Every structure is written in C-alpha cells, then in structure tokens.
Image (tube, grey):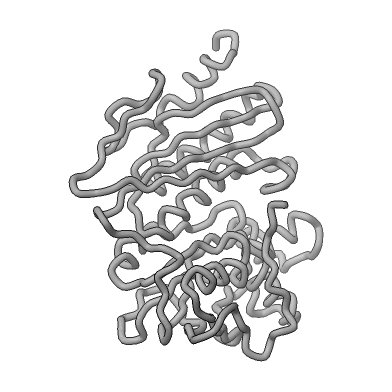
C-alpha cells in the first residue's frame, strides 16, 4: 500500500460503496449527483456521533460504522422515506489500518442492509467523530410528521424497548446481565434495526411518527407537543425482549425502556380502526390535554438523553 494520506485512505477504504439506483455521480468530484425517482421529493437528515459521548471509548470500527449508518437511517424510516444514499464525514486522531479495515467491514454491512450507498464525504484529523447525512425519497406532497396525531388514536411502537440502554449500561460496567444475554443486548446498542422496511406501509396508515433515540417518554412527548394533545401510555403494554422480561428489577427495566434511549425503534399514531402492522405493539392512546402520562408510574422521570 502506498504512503497513506487523506486521498489514499479514501480510495482504499471508502471508494467501493457508491453504486446504487440513485447514484449518477459518486465520490471524486466536488459534489455527488443523485437521481430522484419520478414524482418524489427529497428527505435528508444528519447525525454526529462522538467517541465517549455517543459510543464508549475503545469501540470497534466495525460497530461504530454500522451504528452511525443505522441511527441516521432510522430518521428516514420515521418520516416514511425510502433510502437513496449517504455521505460520511470522519475525523480520526491517526491513520490506523487495522481500525480502518474494521470500519470498512461495518460500513459495508450497513450500506448493504439499509440500501444507502456512500456517495461522498470528508476525512480529517481530530478526535474520533463520525457524521452521517442520509438522503431518501418521499412521494411528492407526503411525509410523516410529529404534528399529525389526532385525538382518539392509538399509539404504537415497533420491536422491543430498553435493550439498547441495558446493553450500554453493561458496556459502562453499571450492571452484569446473564451470560446468554450479553451479546444480544450489546448488539441492540450497536446494531439498531432502523425500521425502513415499515416506512412505506406507515406512510399509508400512520398520522404521526418519530424514532426513539432519546427515550420513549421524551420522544413521544414531541408528538404530543407538536400535535397539541396528550398521550397516555400504559407501561404494562410496553414490549420487552426475553432478556429484559426475566429480570426481577421492574423499575430498572422500565427506566431503560422509558428514558434510556438508543432503541431507534419507531413510535407512531394511527386510527384505531386500521390494521396494526406486524411487529408493532399498541401502548397507549391520544387524548385532549397536553404532555405524556404513564398510568400508575408518574414517579418515573420523563427526561431522556440531553445533548447539553
């Protein structure tokens, strides 16, 4: 391998992933050029992950790359968008070939899983930081917002909640799960599902949507606030994985599910007379008023993750 600099690193580790149905021009020029499907509009979102803040120190490049793509893809799913492409800005303290090979492996897996070809970005020296910008397409004039919920609708979530927060707590040496559950919980933190497979169907039935990144109570609170109503949550209906269901510390499990964050599942509202999509669980309903209330568990803090 030639002497490594910014351009040779890009060629070696980031140049193989630009092919996709939306790619007209990939990396190499000042801009990428994307082809939008007919009668669609562009959806875009950007997220930054910083070592020691959004993932633990010493995390593998493989895990960091996958998590970075997956968390950004979740924003597309929440709006009902279909994936088109992504760009990455990466800051590295040094050029570490072994780490970059692992990063490339995780990047390849995520790009393939979420159909988000890498069409550009930036590489610079600095603290380990990764910013991913994703692009998606929506039918012209249509998208899911936080402000569309109406009174008398049901509130649902995808998947199970609390696993990622439990996995992060284990990584931070705050608790010790059963040996059989460690790999599952850590994977739930580093490998979110990002429910793009549901995006199109939710666009047909949902009235509002948000991805659960900062914690269920904080994020569903955005729907309540933006829609001008209250949301009533029945915590007995919140879906838990087998790994969390068998724990005897119910308050801790609820705390992880309600305010732990990092699930990157979707929370959405829909009319009660619509068919519930597979893998989704009703956990409450919308009502007149304001804010979020958890029946019987008002003592649990509604605070989720805060950036400042």
- Quadrant of image for the N terminus: top right
Coordinates of residue 113 in the picture (x, y in percent) = 41, 48
**Depth check, front residue: 288 or 215:** 288
Q: Which quadrant of the structure image shows residue 116?
A: top left
Name the residue at 68% across, 47% down.
55
Residue farthest toward the bottom in the current orientation of the protein: 296
**Depth check, front residue: 264 or 106:** 264
Coordinates of residue 119 in the picture (x, y in percent) = 40, 31
- Figure check: 296 above or below 95: below
Coordinates of residue 107 in the picture (x, y in percent) = 50, 38
**Depth check, front residue: 299 or 27:** 299
- Figure check: 177 above or below 92: below
- Figure check: 222 above or below 138: below
Name the residue at 37% across, 63% down.
144
Name the residue at 62% across, 89% down.
295
Name the residue at 57% across, 35% down.
103
**Depth check, front residue: 109 or 226:** 226
- The count of marks equals 0
Q: Is residue 29 left or right of residue 304?
A: left
Q: Which quadrant of the structure image shows residue 209?
A: bottom left
Residue farthest toward the right in the current orientation of the protein: 174
Residue farthest toward the left in the current orientation of the protein: 38
Coordinates of residue 39 in the picture (x, y in percent) = 19, 49
Q: Is residue 217 left or right of residue 154?
A: right
Q: Is residue 208 left or right of residue 229?
A: left
Q: Is residue 111 left or right of residue 162?
A: left
């Amino acid at each position: 391998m030639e002497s490594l600099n910014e351009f040779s690193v890009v060629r070696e580790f980031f140049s193989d992933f630009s092919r996709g149905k939306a790619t007209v021009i990939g990396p190499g020029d000042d801009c990428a050029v994307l082809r939008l499907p007919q009668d669609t509009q562009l959806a875009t979102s950007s997220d930054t992950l910083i070592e020691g803040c959004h993932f633990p120190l010493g995390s593998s490049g493989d895990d960091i790359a996958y998590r970075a793509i997956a968390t950004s893809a979740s924003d597309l799913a929440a709006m009902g968008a279909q994936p088109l492409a992504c760009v990455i800005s990466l800051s590295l303290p040094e050029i570490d070939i072994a780490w970059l090979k692992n990063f490339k492996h995780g990047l390849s897996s995520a790009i393939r899983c979420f159909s988000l070809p890498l069409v550009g970005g930036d590489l610079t020296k600095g603290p380990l930081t990764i910013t991913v910008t994703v692009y998606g397409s929506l039918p012209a004039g249509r998208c899911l917002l936080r402000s569309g919920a109406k009174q008398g609708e049901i509130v649902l979530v995808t998947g199970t909640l609390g696993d990622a927060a439990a996995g992060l707590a284990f990584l931070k040496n705050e608790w010790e799960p059963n040996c059989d559950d460690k790999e599952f919980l850590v994977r739930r933190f580093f490998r979110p599902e990002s429910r793009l497979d549901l995006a199109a169907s939710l666009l047909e039935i949902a009235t509002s949507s948000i991805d659960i990144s900062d914690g269920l109570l904080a994020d569903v609170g955005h729907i309540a606030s933006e829609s001008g109503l209250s949301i009533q949550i029945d915590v007995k209906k919140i879906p838990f994985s087998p790994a969390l269901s068998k724990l005897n510390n119910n308050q801790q499990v609820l705390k992880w599910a309600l305010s732990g964050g990092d699930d990157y599942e979707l929370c959405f509202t829909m009319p009660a007379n619509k068919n519930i999509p597979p893998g989704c669980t009703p956990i409450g309903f919308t009502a007149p008023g304001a804010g979020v209330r958890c029946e019987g568990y008002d003592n649990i803090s509604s605070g989720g993750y805060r950036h400042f």
